[in-house]
Amino acid sequence: MRYAVHCWRKLATRLLDWVYTPQCELCGEVLQDGRSLCESCDRELPRLSAPFCATCGEPFQGRIDGPFQCPNCGELDFTFSFARPAMLRDERTRQLVHQLKYGRAIHLAAELGRLAAESFRDERLRPALAGHWPLVPVPLHRSRFQHRNFNQAAEIARSVARHTGLPVLAALKRIRRTDTQALLGRKQRLSNLHGAFAVTGAGRRHLATAAAGVILIDDVLTTGSTAEACAATLRRAGCKTVLVVTVMRG
Ligand SMILES: [Zn+2]
Ligand SMILES: [Zn+2]
């Protein structure tokens, strides 16, 4: 059975290669094995590295020894413990996320999830790995899902799951459609998101037996308002700890 699945996968990959030549999304190099980023573009992507804010992952230019918090997070009290983006924002990371979301380049979710999974090298995520905490994608509202046909956070979470061995749990749903957040400040974003999320039946069942923690997955962390609204919803449902992993810092 396994062999048959393997053969089908191989055949499907070949067919896809035949209809569409896989190329590196960034430099156009022709690629094999279903990859969409070449090795050198991948290697040169801007990984988040110390020093960065222990709460939101905002990078700090210069030298700081030990953990620190950015001035912005010093004034805020997030419900999630910390957010760990894997990448910094630049032309390339922005292009990859943008292409996935708006260019319907769903194949990029595999690469972006693999990159997001690099965040799990951060030792603060060790308890989550050891405790087999589920990956919870930030949900899209039904109307937006129907328009886009996929939820980028869920696609990324599936790929993170393959690389970490953690399960994906659709613990959240978006019950209210919200205006686009892009032009809003942090406070406005939070009030815009008020009452936007709810815990699903599956989420409730999971939290009834294992409420230790979950890892929220999204493509980008910008002000942290979306992650905050999701974390607050999960905590109200009994979840003890919410961590956030994203592909990039917005
Ligand atoms: Zn390339
Ligand atoms: Zn911060």
Image (cartoon, helix red, strand yellow):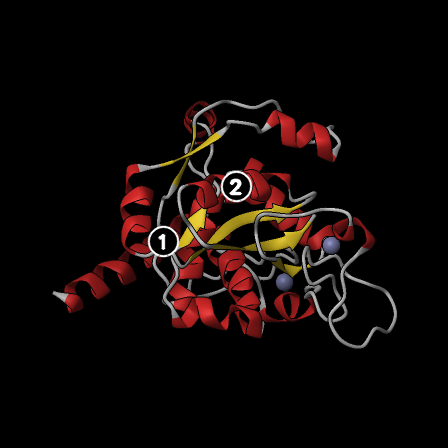
Q: Is mark 2 within 8 Å of ligand 2?
A: no
For the residue marked with disc 2, what is the amino acid? Answer: Ala
Q: Is residue 66 left or right of residue 122?
A: right
Query: Is the N terminus in the top left, top right, bottom left or bottom right quadrant?
Result: bottom left
Check disc 2: other Cα within 10 Å, few if <14, some if 14-19, many if 20+: some
Query: Is residue 25 at all visible to an observer of this figure?
Result: no
* Frontmost residue, 118 versus 1: 118
Whole-percent x, y for residue 123 in the image: 56, 75
Q: Seen from this angle, which residue lies furthest left? A: 1
Q: Which secondary structure lies at badge 2?
A: helix
Query: Is residue 235 at all visible to an observer of this figure?
Result: yes
143 up-or-down from 237: above or below: above
Circle nearer the viewer, 1 or 2: 2
Which residue, given by chain and number where applicable, does mark 1 sit on?
Answer: 168
Label disc, if present, on residue 83 of the rendered structure:
none
Whole-percent x, y for residue 133 in the image: 39, 61
Q: Which secondary structure lies at badge 1?
A: loop
Task: Please name the residue shown 55% across and 38% down the image.
Answer: 229
Q: Spatial distance from mark 1 to mark 2, Cα to Cα?
A: 19 Å
For the residue marked with disc 1, what is the amino acid? Answer: Val
Task: Please name the residue shown 64% across and 27% down the image.
Answer: 191
Which residue, given by chain and number where applicable, does mark 2 sit on?
Answer: 232
